[in-house]
Image (tube, rainbow, N blue to C red):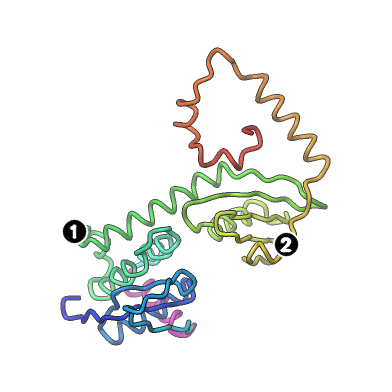
Amino acid sequence: MSNWKLINKTYLYDGTFDGLLTIIFNCYCDKCFPQKILPESDYIENFLDNIILIKTDYSKSKRIFNGIENNISHKALYNSYYAFLSDNSEKEINILKYVCTGFDQGPKIDNMLTLSYVYKVINMRKRALGECHKLKGLLRFIEVGDNMFYASIHPDNNIIEALGHHFINRLPSQNFIIHDKFRNICFIYNTKEYQIINSSNIKLPEISLKEMHYQELWKMFFKTIAIKERTNPKCQMNYMPKKYWKDLIEIP
Protein backbone atom coordinates (compact mmCIF):
# COMPACT_ATOMS: atom_id res chain seq x y z
CA MET A 1 0.00 0.00 0.00
CA SER A 2 3.05 2.26 -0.24
CA ASN A 3 1.75 3.81 -3.48
CA TRP A 4 -1.69 4.56 -2.03
CA LYS A 5 -2.76 8.11 -1.24
CA LEU A 6 -3.99 9.24 2.17
CA ILE A 7 -6.80 11.72 1.56
CA ASN A 8 -8.02 14.31 4.03
CA LYS A 9 -11.58 13.01 4.20
CA THR A 10 -13.88 11.29 6.69
CA TYR A 11 -16.10 8.57 5.25
CA LEU A 12 -19.46 7.99 6.88
CA TYR A 13 -21.50 4.81 6.27
CA ASP A 14 -24.59 3.05 7.62
CA GLY A 15 -22.69 0.94 10.17
CA THR A 16 -23.26 -2.40 8.41
CA PHE A 17 -20.68 -4.89 7.18
CA ASP A 18 -22.00 -4.42 3.63
CA GLY A 19 -21.50 -0.69 4.04
CA LEU A 20 -17.88 -1.18 5.05
CA LEU A 21 -17.29 -3.57 2.12
CA THR A 22 -18.68 -0.88 -0.20
CA ILE A 23 -16.07 1.56 1.14
CA ILE A 24 -13.34 -1.04 0.65
CA PHE A 25 -14.44 -1.49 -2.99
CA ASN A 26 -14.25 2.27 -3.65
CA CYS A 27 -10.90 2.65 -1.91
CA TYR A 28 -9.33 -0.29 -3.71
CA CYS A 29 -10.44 1.05 -7.09
CA ASP A 30 -9.18 4.58 -6.31
CA LYS A 31 -5.99 3.38 -4.53
CA CYS A 32 -6.59 5.76 -1.63
CA PHE A 33 -7.84 5.59 1.92
CA PRO A 34 -9.42 8.26 4.15
CA GLN A 35 -8.21 9.54 7.48
CA LYS A 36 -11.30 8.20 9.28
CA ILE A 37 -14.25 5.88 8.69
CA LEU A 38 -17.21 6.16 11.05
CA PRO A 39 -20.82 4.96 11.25
CA GLU A 40 -23.09 7.89 10.43
CA SER A 41 -24.96 7.40 13.73
CA ASP A 42 -21.73 7.79 15.75
CA TYR A 43 -20.43 10.89 14.03
CA ILE A 44 -20.21 14.11 16.03
CA GLU A 45 -20.20 17.09 13.69
CA ASN A 46 -16.86 18.85 13.37
CA PHE A 47 -16.31 21.73 10.97
CA LEU A 48 -12.71 20.58 10.43
CA ASP A 49 -13.82 17.27 8.89
CA ASN A 50 -14.27 16.87 5.16
CA ILE A 51 -17.27 14.52 5.13
CA ILE A 52 -18.26 12.06 2.40
CA LEU A 53 -21.32 9.86 2.94
CA ILE A 54 -20.89 6.45 1.29
CA LYS A 55 -24.17 4.70 0.50
CA THR A 56 -24.22 0.92 0.73
CA ASP A 57 -24.03 -0.76 -2.69
CA TYR A 58 -24.79 -4.48 -2.37
CA SER A 59 -23.31 -5.33 -5.76
CA LYS A 60 -19.99 -3.78 -4.68
CA SER A 61 -20.07 -5.40 -1.24
CA LYS A 62 -20.79 -8.81 -2.79
CA ARG A 63 -17.79 -8.47 -5.10
CA ILE A 64 -15.50 -7.64 -2.18
CA PHE A 65 -17.02 -10.42 -0.05
CA ASN A 66 -16.40 -13.00 -2.77
CA GLY A 67 -13.03 -11.44 -3.57
CA ILE A 68 -11.77 -11.83 0.00
CA GLU A 69 -12.76 -15.50 0.06
CA ASN A 70 -11.49 -16.36 -3.43
CA ASN A 71 -8.37 -14.17 -3.68
CA ILE A 72 -7.19 -14.04 -0.07
CA SER A 73 -8.72 -16.83 2.03
CA HIS A 74 -11.81 -17.88 3.93
CA LYS A 75 -9.84 -17.18 7.09
CA ALA A 76 -9.34 -13.56 6.01
CA LEU A 77 -13.10 -13.19 5.51
CA TYR A 78 -13.65 -14.74 8.94
CA ASN A 79 -11.10 -12.34 10.50
CA SER A 80 -12.64 -9.32 8.80
CA TYR A 81 -16.20 -10.11 9.87
CA TYR A 82 -15.42 -10.82 13.52
CA ALA A 83 -13.08 -7.83 13.73
CA PHE A 84 -16.01 -5.76 12.44
CA LEU A 85 -18.07 -6.93 15.43
CA SER A 86 -15.46 -5.47 17.77
CA ASP A 87 -16.10 -2.33 19.80
CA ASN A 88 -12.75 -0.88 18.69
CA SER A 89 -13.27 2.70 17.48
CA GLU A 90 -10.70 2.30 14.68
CA LYS A 91 -11.85 -1.08 13.39
CA GLU A 92 -13.01 0.19 9.97
CA ILE A 93 -9.74 1.77 8.88
CA ASN A 94 -7.75 -1.24 10.07
CA ILE A 95 -10.02 -3.72 8.26
CA LEU A 96 -9.78 -1.58 5.11
CA LYS A 97 -5.96 -1.70 5.14
CA TYR A 98 -5.96 -5.41 6.06
CA VAL A 99 -8.25 -6.43 3.18
CA CYS A 100 -6.60 -4.22 0.55
CA THR A 101 -3.13 -5.47 1.50
CA GLY A 102 -4.56 -9.00 1.42
CA PHE A 103 -5.62 -8.53 -2.20
CA ASP A 104 -1.98 -7.79 -3.04
CA GLN A 105 -0.33 -10.37 -0.76
CA GLY A 106 -2.83 -13.24 -0.77
CA PRO A 107 -3.21 -15.79 2.07
CA LYS A 108 0.12 -14.88 3.67
CA ILE A 109 -1.41 -11.62 4.96
CA ASP A 110 -2.24 -13.25 8.30
CA ASN A 111 1.45 -13.99 8.91
CA MET A 112 2.43 -10.35 8.40
CA LEU A 113 1.93 -9.39 12.03
CA THR A 114 4.61 -6.70 11.88
CA LEU A 115 2.00 -4.61 10.03
CA SER A 116 0.09 -2.87 12.83
CA TYR A 117 -3.29 -3.10 11.10
CA VAL A 118 -2.94 -6.86 10.54
CA TYR A 119 -2.04 -7.35 14.21
CA LYS A 120 -5.00 -5.20 15.29
CA VAL A 121 -7.50 -7.04 13.06
CA ILE A 122 -6.37 -10.42 14.45
CA ASN A 123 -6.70 -9.15 18.01
CA MET A 124 -10.10 -7.57 17.41
CA ARG A 125 -11.29 -10.89 15.97
CA LYS A 126 -9.97 -12.77 18.99
CA ARG A 127 -11.65 -10.37 21.41
CA ALA A 128 -15.06 -10.50 19.73
CA LEU A 129 -14.93 -14.28 19.29
CA GLY A 130 -13.80 -14.77 22.88
CA GLU A 131 -16.75 -12.82 24.26
CA CYS A 132 -19.13 -14.63 21.91
CA HIS A 133 -17.78 -17.98 23.13
CA LYS A 134 -18.29 -16.96 26.77
CA LEU A 135 -21.86 -15.87 26.20
CA LYS A 136 -22.76 -19.07 24.35
CA GLY A 137 -22.32 -20.82 27.69
CA LEU A 138 -23.48 -18.01 29.98
CA LEU A 139 -26.60 -16.67 28.25
CA ARG A 140 -29.78 -17.46 30.26
CA PHE A 141 -33.15 -17.85 28.56
CA ILE A 142 -36.31 -17.25 30.57
CA GLU A 143 -39.90 -17.98 29.56
CA VAL A 144 -41.83 -14.80 28.88
CA GLY A 145 -44.90 -16.01 27.02
CA ASP A 146 -46.51 -18.82 25.10
CA ASN A 147 -43.55 -20.76 23.70
CA MET A 148 -41.34 -17.66 23.75
CA PHE A 149 -38.00 -17.36 25.52
CA TYR A 150 -35.96 -14.24 26.26
CA ALA A 151 -32.37 -13.50 27.29
CA SER A 152 -30.67 -10.20 28.05
CA ILE A 153 -26.97 -9.47 27.55
CA HIS A 154 -24.62 -6.49 27.94
CA PRO A 155 -21.67 -7.40 25.66
CA ASP A 156 -18.70 -5.14 24.95
CA ASN A 157 -18.73 -6.20 21.29
CA ASN A 158 -21.63 -6.20 18.83
CA ILE A 159 -21.95 -10.01 18.73
CA ILE A 160 -25.74 -10.40 18.87
CA GLU A 161 -26.07 -11.74 15.30
CA ALA A 162 -23.27 -14.29 15.71
CA LEU A 163 -24.77 -15.35 19.04
CA GLY A 164 -28.23 -15.56 17.51
CA HIS A 165 -27.07 -17.87 14.72
CA HIS A 166 -25.49 -20.16 17.30
CA PHE A 167 -28.80 -20.54 19.14
CA ILE A 168 -30.76 -20.97 15.91
CA ASN A 169 -28.59 -24.03 15.28
CA ARG A 170 -29.05 -25.22 18.87
CA LEU A 171 -32.76 -24.41 19.17
CA PRO A 172 -34.17 -24.48 15.61
CA SER A 173 -37.77 -25.12 16.71
CA GLN A 174 -37.84 -22.58 19.56
CA ASN A 175 -39.03 -18.97 19.42
CA PHE A 176 -36.58 -16.71 21.22
CA ILE A 177 -35.39 -13.14 21.72
CA ILE A 178 -31.84 -12.09 22.58
CA HIS A 179 -31.76 -8.52 23.86
CA ASP A 180 -28.54 -6.50 23.74
CA LYS A 181 -29.40 -3.89 26.34
CA PHE A 182 -26.14 -2.03 25.84
CA ARG A 183 -26.98 -1.27 22.18
CA ASN A 184 -30.75 -1.36 22.57
CA ILE A 185 -31.26 -4.01 19.87
CA CYS A 186 -33.02 -7.39 19.76
CA PHE A 187 -32.38 -10.56 17.79
CA ILE A 188 -35.80 -12.14 17.24
CA TYR A 189 -36.24 -15.68 15.88
CA ASN A 190 -39.64 -17.28 15.11
CA THR A 191 -38.45 -20.79 14.03
CA LYS A 192 -38.48 -19.73 10.33
CA GLU A 193 -36.53 -16.49 10.06
CA TYR A 194 -34.84 -13.89 12.20
CA GLN A 195 -34.55 -10.13 12.31
CA ILE A 196 -32.55 -7.60 14.31
CA ILE A 197 -34.53 -4.55 15.36
CA ASN A 198 -34.35 -1.63 17.74
CA SER A 199 -35.78 -2.81 21.06
CA SER A 200 -37.67 0.46 21.54
CA ASN A 201 -39.87 -0.63 18.61
CA ILE A 202 -41.23 -3.70 20.41
CA LYS A 203 -43.01 -4.41 23.67
CA LEU A 204 -41.31 -7.24 25.50
CA PRO A 205 -43.74 -9.73 27.08
CA GLU A 206 -43.92 -10.23 30.84
CA ILE A 207 -42.21 -13.13 32.56
CA SER A 208 -44.48 -16.16 32.96
CA LEU A 209 -45.69 -17.44 36.34
CA LYS A 210 -44.04 -20.80 35.71
CA GLU A 211 -40.74 -19.06 35.03
CA MET A 212 -41.01 -17.04 38.25
CA HIS A 213 -41.58 -20.26 40.17
CA TYR A 214 -38.52 -21.94 38.67
CA GLN A 215 -36.40 -18.85 39.30
CA GLU A 216 -37.30 -18.92 42.97
CA LEU A 217 -36.39 -22.62 43.14
CA TRP A 218 -33.06 -21.94 41.45
CA LYS A 219 -32.25 -19.08 43.84
CA MET A 220 -33.12 -21.30 46.79
CA PHE A 221 -30.87 -24.07 45.47
CA PHE A 222 -28.03 -21.61 44.81
CA LYS A 223 -28.30 -20.21 48.32
CA THR A 224 -28.62 -23.63 49.98
CA ILE A 225 -25.48 -25.16 48.46
CA ALA A 226 -23.36 -22.11 49.26
CA ILE A 227 -21.01 -22.42 52.26
CA LYS A 228 -21.12 -19.11 54.09
CA GLU A 229 -17.69 -19.53 55.67
CA ARG A 230 -16.10 -20.04 52.25
CA THR A 231 -17.64 -16.99 50.58
CA ASN A 232 -14.91 -15.29 48.56
CA PRO A 233 -16.25 -12.44 46.36
CA LYS A 234 -12.80 -11.71 44.88
CA CYS A 235 -12.35 -15.31 43.74
CA GLN A 236 -15.93 -15.35 42.44
CA MET A 237 -15.25 -12.29 40.30
CA ASN A 238 -12.16 -13.97 38.82
CA TYR A 239 -14.32 -16.79 37.48
CA MET A 240 -17.44 -14.72 36.79
CA PRO A 241 -16.64 -11.05 35.99
CA LYS A 242 -18.99 -8.60 37.64
CA LYS A 243 -20.14 -7.14 34.31
CA TYR A 244 -22.09 -10.37 33.67
CA TRP A 245 -23.89 -10.40 37.03
CA LYS A 246 -26.75 -8.13 35.93
CA ASP A 247 -27.95 -10.86 33.53
CA LEU A 248 -27.79 -13.71 36.05
CA ILE A 249 -30.88 -14.85 37.96
CA GLU A 250 -29.13 -16.02 41.11
CA ILE A 251 -27.19 -12.80 41.73
CA PRO A 252 -29.34 -9.87 42.90
Kindly state the secondary structure of the residue where label 1 is placed: loop
Label 1 CA crowd tier, 10 Å (few <14, some 14–19, many 20+): few
Tally of marks: 2
Name the residue rendered at 55%, 61% in the picture.
Answer: 161
Kindly state the secondary structure of the residue where label 2 is placed: loop
- Snapshot quadrant of residue 97: bottom left
- Snapshot quadrant of residue 197: bottom right
Magenta stretch secondary structure, dominant? helix
Q: Is residue 226 above or below residue 251?
A: above
Q: CA distance from mark 2 to mark 1?
A: 46 Å
What span is in magenta? 58-72
Q: Which mark is residue 231?
A: none
* Image side of residue 210 versus residue 8, left or right: right
Residue that numbered label 1 is attached to: 114
Name the residue rendered at 65%, 25% in the picture.
Answer: 222
Farthest top residue in view: 229
Q: Where in the figure is residue 120, as x and y percent of width and height?
A: 30, 58
Q: Where in the figure is residue 139, as x and y percent of width and height?
A: 60, 45
* Image side of residue 235 versus residue 209, left or right: left
Closer to the N terminus: mark 2 or mark 1?
1
Q: Amino acid at mark 2?
A: Asn
Residue that numbered label 2 is attached to: 190
Q: Where in the figure is residue 155, as x and y percent of width and height?
A: 51, 51
Q: Where in the figure is residue 192, as x and y percent of width and height?
A: 71, 65
Q: Amino acid at mark 1?
A: Thr
Q: Please check the rendered image and state whether residue 164 is part of the magenta-colored stretch, yes or no.
A: no
Q: Is residue 89 above or below residue 40?
A: above
